[in-house]
Image (tube, coloured by chain):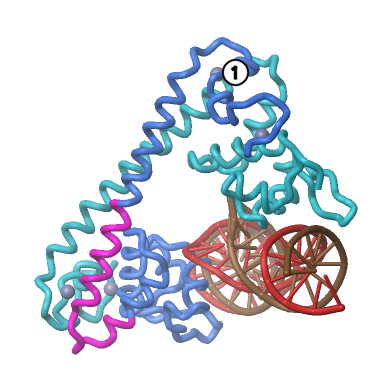
Chain colours: A blue, B cyan, C red, D brown
Amino acid sequence: MAKQELSIGALGKLTGTKVETIRFYEKIGILPAPARTAGNYRSYGHDHVRRLTFVRRVRDLGFPLETVRAMLDLADQPDRPCGEVDALVVEQLGEVERKIADLERLRDELDRLAHQCRRGGRVADCRIIEALSPHHEDGRCCP
Amino acid sequence: MAKQELSIGALGKLTGTKVETIRFYEKIGILPAPARTAGNYRSYGHDHVRRLTFVRRVRDLGFPLETVRAMLDLADQPDRPCGEVDALVVEQLGEVERKIADLERLRDELDRLAHQCRRGGRVADCRIIEALSPHHEDGRCCP
DNA sequence: ATGGACCTTGGAGTTACTACAGGGTCAAGA
DNA sequence: TCTTGACCCTGTAGTAACTCCAAGGTCCAT
Ligand SMILES: [Zn+2]
Ligand SMILES: [Zn+2]
Ligand SMILES: [Zn+2]
Ligand SMILES: [Zn+2]
């Protein structure tokens, strides 16, 4: 492998990406197919490092691959206004804030649940299980 | 369908579960196979309502199906101590708190990102894309 | 008896990877 | 030179937890 060229494993180490993931990105068109060596090994250059780093950062920020694809498309058209990119970030910010709010509600409920049961009882008396089951015990059904 | 018996659609409405999901739970053994009517329709009773309600609530609290299964097993052995159930809740609480912390870090980063770009520029100058790509532009690779 | 709402089965699709199985390549050490 | 071990190749299947579809059967009211 010529200098400035990286094997798939080296690229993976450099970007914190598993080898299988890199091949997967190639298959679905997120990364372009690289040149091959005489022995049919993939050979990556600096552009691949840049592109894959971008992909991983965007993924780490919680964006789905679909959004990664959209951003890559936009980045490839440098003359278009960048409002769309910015909008994607703002949208994702909103989604993250929504998720945080959901999880905070969840946390409160779990916290309440965790305090309902003074340990040491039997499962039959567990308040947690009681709290999670419907409240009526008779044989007739709910509606 | 006799009274006190529910069709799969009725059970779904009652518990906020899609019909396909109920069948899926049956296939993987979370719900027992119900009786059938003459016309081969599934026929559910009150026990199914209770069990499915439990499953959905536990899922809504963010537990994976594997944990649901463990809880159902425990609930079926009423004489065992309930410490294990309680421990599962506490564990999940910790996980939710970890997720919240992760998302809060994410939110801050996205927020920073969203403020980097005063809109109106071109993609080529977009600070967001710049911030997400590696910092060097020369032809030699990173290591 | 006919329409429409509901039910049946089996199988495929979703997201974003991850894990083999069964081979080929390459560099270094004995 | 041979061999060993780390690395690479392809292709397929598996993961979580559903969700959707096709092609057909059932039920009830008009
Ligand atoms: Zn308890
Ligand atoms: Zn009931
Ligand atoms: Zn911008
Ligand atoms: Zn580089």
The relative height of residue B41 versus residue B141 in the rendered view (above or below) is: above
In the depicted structure, whether residue B112 falls above or below residue A99 = below
Q: Amino acid at mark 1?
A: Cys
Query: Would residue B55 be counted in the magenta stretch?
Result: no
| Quarter of the figure with the C terminus of chain B | bottom left
**Which contiguous range is marked in magenta?**
A73-97
Q: Nearer the viewer, residue B83 or A33?
A: B83
Give me the residue at 26% from left, 58% from top: A93
Is residue B5 toward the left or the right of residue A99 in the image? right
Query: Residue lying furthest top in this view?
Result: A120
Of B64 and D18, the residue lying toward us: D18
Q: Is residue B114 left or right of residue D30?
A: left
Instruction: Label the magenta part by its dominant secondary structure.
Output: helix
Cβ of disc 1 within 8 Å of ligand 1? yes
In this rendering, does residue B28 appear at all?
Answer: yes
Q: Residue at x 41, y 25 (%)?
A: A112
For residue A80, above or below residue D23: below
Please report, as a chain letter, where disc 1 is located.
B
Secondary structure beneath dot 1 equals: loop
Query: Where does the image place residue D28, in percent across and percent down from the top left?
Result: 78, 58
Q: Write down which quadrant ligand 1 falls in.
A: top right
Determine if residue A3 is in view: no
Residue at coordinates 68% horizontally, 53% vertically from top-left? B9
Question: Residue A50, position in %: x, y?
Answer: 30, 74
* The quadrant where residue A66 appears: bottom left
The residue depicted at 53 percent of the width and 66 percent of the height is: A20
Q: Which residue is mark 1?
A: B82
Left or right: A5, with A26 as reference point: left
Q: How many discs mark residues in the rendered view?
A: 1
Q: Is residue A50 above or below residue B42?
A: below
B95 and B68: which is toward the camera:
B68
Asked if residue A88 lies in the magenta stretch, the reply is yes
